[in-house]
Amino acid sequence: MKKLVATFFLTVLISVTVFGQAPPTLRIVTESPDLPSELFYGDIKVKPLRLRPGTNTVITIADYDFFIQQHYIDFLRRFPEPSGMQFYLNILNGCNPSDVECVKFTRGALSANFFRSPEFQRKGSYVMYLYMVSLGQRPATPTEVNDPNKIDRPHYAEFMTDLQTISVPNDDAVLGEQKKVELTNAWMQRAEIKARFDALSNAAFVQKLVDTAGVTIPNQAQLVTDLNNATKTRAQVLRAIVESPQVDDKFYKQAFVTMEYFGYLRRDPEVCVGSPNPAQCGYIFHNERFKLSGDKDFIENTIVRGFIESPEYINRF
C-alpha cells in the first residue's frame, strides 16, 4: 500500500443564483487550527476529492492509511506519528483483503482501541467526566429518560473545544499535564460552575459533586479535610473525583457511546428525553447493547462497527 504522503483537494462548485436571492457563501470551518478544516457551501458540506500524490487514484475511508489517520484526528486531535501509523497498518495488513469479515472485524477492533487507549482516557474521558461529575449526565436507559438530574451534556461543540485545550502534539506528557491543570482551574471559573458551587461550604461542595455523579468516594472525608486545610484547591478535588475509579466504573460505557457519536458522526447523540419509544432511540439502543452476552471488548467492537459501517459515517468522506 502506498503511504498517505499528502492530501489534495479538488473541489468543483456549481452554483445557480436565483433571481432576487443572494447565492450561498463558502465557509471554512476549523475546529482545530493544526488539523484539517471543512468546507461548506451555505449549509451543505463540500466533500473534497482526495487523490494519491502524483496519481488519479482516489483516497477513500476504506483505505487503511486514511482510515487510521482519521482516527488520530477524530479521537486524539492530532496527526499520527510514523510508528503509530505503521503499528496499525501492520494489524490491518494481517487480513487477506479478500476476507471481508476479517477486514471489518479488525477495523472495528482497531477503532475501539482508540477509545480504550491511555491517551484518549487521559484526555477525552477526562473532559467527558468533568461534565458528568459537575453538571449531570445523559440518560442511558429507557427508565432514566424523565430523570430531572440527567441532562444532555456535554454537547459536541463544547466537548471538542475543551478536548482541544488539552490535546498536544505527540502526546507530550509534561505539556499535557500542564494543560490539564489549566483546564481544570479555568473550569472552576466558568459562570455555570460558579453559580452551582461557589456558595457551598467545602463539605457541601464535595457532597454535591458525588451526588451529581451518583457515586460513593471512599476518601470523601479526606478531600473535605484537604480543602479545609488548604492543602488542595477545589479544582484539585474536582479532578480527584473525576479521575477516581468509581467515576470511571459508572460512566465508562455511556461515555463510550457518546464518544462514538462525537468521534465518528461529529454530532450530538439523539435527544431521547420525551421520545415516544425511548428504547428505539439510537443513543439508548447502543447503551442497551452492553447488556448483550459476550465479553466487554466484543460488545464494544460490535457497537463501533455499527458506527463505522453506517452510511452516515462513510458519507462524511
Image: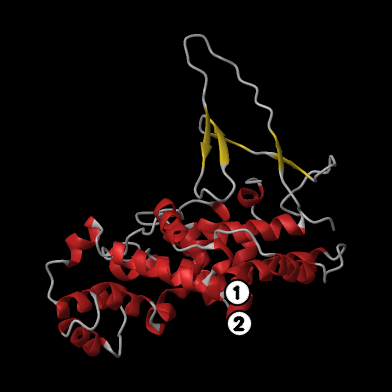
Residue 53: x and y in percent read 80, 44
As drawn, the residue found furthest toward the top would be 19
Q: Secondary structure at mark 1?
A: helix
Above/below status of 258 relative to 50: below
Q: Which part of the image, by quadrant, shows the N terminus?
A: bottom right
Label 2, label 1: how many angstroms apart (C-alpha)?
A: 6 Å
- Identify the residue at image location x=19%, y=81%: 230
Q: Which one is nearer the viewer's eye here, 305 or 292?
A: 305
Q: Secondary structure at mark 2?
A: loop
| Dot 2 and dot 1 residues touching (CB under 8 Å) | yes
**Which mark is drawn over residue 295?**
2
Q: Which residue is mark 1?
A: 299
Q: Is residue 95 left or right of residue 249?
A: right
How many C-alpha atoms fall within 10 Å of the one at disc 1: few (<14), some, or many (≥20)? some
Residue 243: x and y in percent read 39, 78
Residue type of the residue flagged with mark 2: Asp
Residue type of the residue flagged with mark 1: Ile
Q: Is residue 228 left or right of residue 171?
A: left
